[in-house]
Amino acid sequence: KAGIESDFEGSGTTSRSVNFVATITCRVVEVLPNGNLVIEGYREVKINREKEYIALSGIVRPEDIGPDNTVLSTAVADARIEYSGSGVLSDRQGPGFLTRVLDLIWPF
């Protein structure tokens, strides 16, 4: 008779709040048949050994472009906004090396 028993008890909390205001210069990469514009833009900022990356892509109607050549993010259809970073603080937010290795070997 053989049996396997595994118990795990744990608890944890996580909280993340991100609020940012950024201006990103975008390029028109395609003009659709209906006149709408496919845009893409990318920005990298380095502050105190932390790098932050912001990327934006989506579709903009020409009538949503303001007189100062700006578009609010709320007017970008199919908006894809990516915000990530790297550095001392960002690197410590994920699981440790040993945890990642154990998850690969024994994912239970």
Image (cartoon, helix red, strand yellow):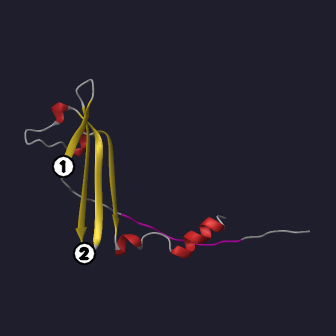
Query: Which residue occupies 29% across, 71% down?
Result: 50
Query: Which residue occupies 29% across, 59% down?
Result: 53
Quarter of the image where the C terminus is located: bottom right
Query: Which residue occupies 8% across, 42% down?
Result: 68
> Which residue appears farthest toward the front when viewing the image?
29
Secondary structure of residue under mark 2:
loop
Q: Magenta residues? A: 7-16
Q: Residues within 10 Å of mark 2 (few under 14, many from 20)?
A: few
In space, the residues marked 2 and 1 are separated at their CA atoms by: 23 Å
Image spot of residue 101 (x, y percent)? 58, 71
Secondary structure of residue under mark 1:
loop
> Which residue appears farthest toward the right when viewing the image?
1
Residue highlighted by disc 2: 48
Query: Which residue occupies 88% across, 69% down?
Result: 2
Q: Is residue 108 magenta?
A: no
Image spot of residue 106 (x, y percent)? 66, 67
Answer with the quarter of the image where residue 14 lies.
Answer: bottom left
Image spot of residue 93 (x, y percent)? 42, 70
User: Disc 2 marks which amino acid?
Assistant: Asn
Residue highlighted by disc 1: 25
Answer with the quarter of the image where residue 66 lies.
Answer: top left
**Is residue 75 found left or right of 87 in the rendered image?**
left
**Is residue 103 found left or right of 4 in the rendered image?**
left
N-term-proximal mark, 2 vs 1: 1
User: Disc 1 marks which amino acid?
Assistant: Thr
Q: Nearer the viewer, residue 38 or 18?
A: 38
User: On screen, 12 above or below 43?
Assistant: below
Answer with the quarter of the image where residue 79 lies.
Answer: top left
Quarter of the image where the N terminus is located: bottom right
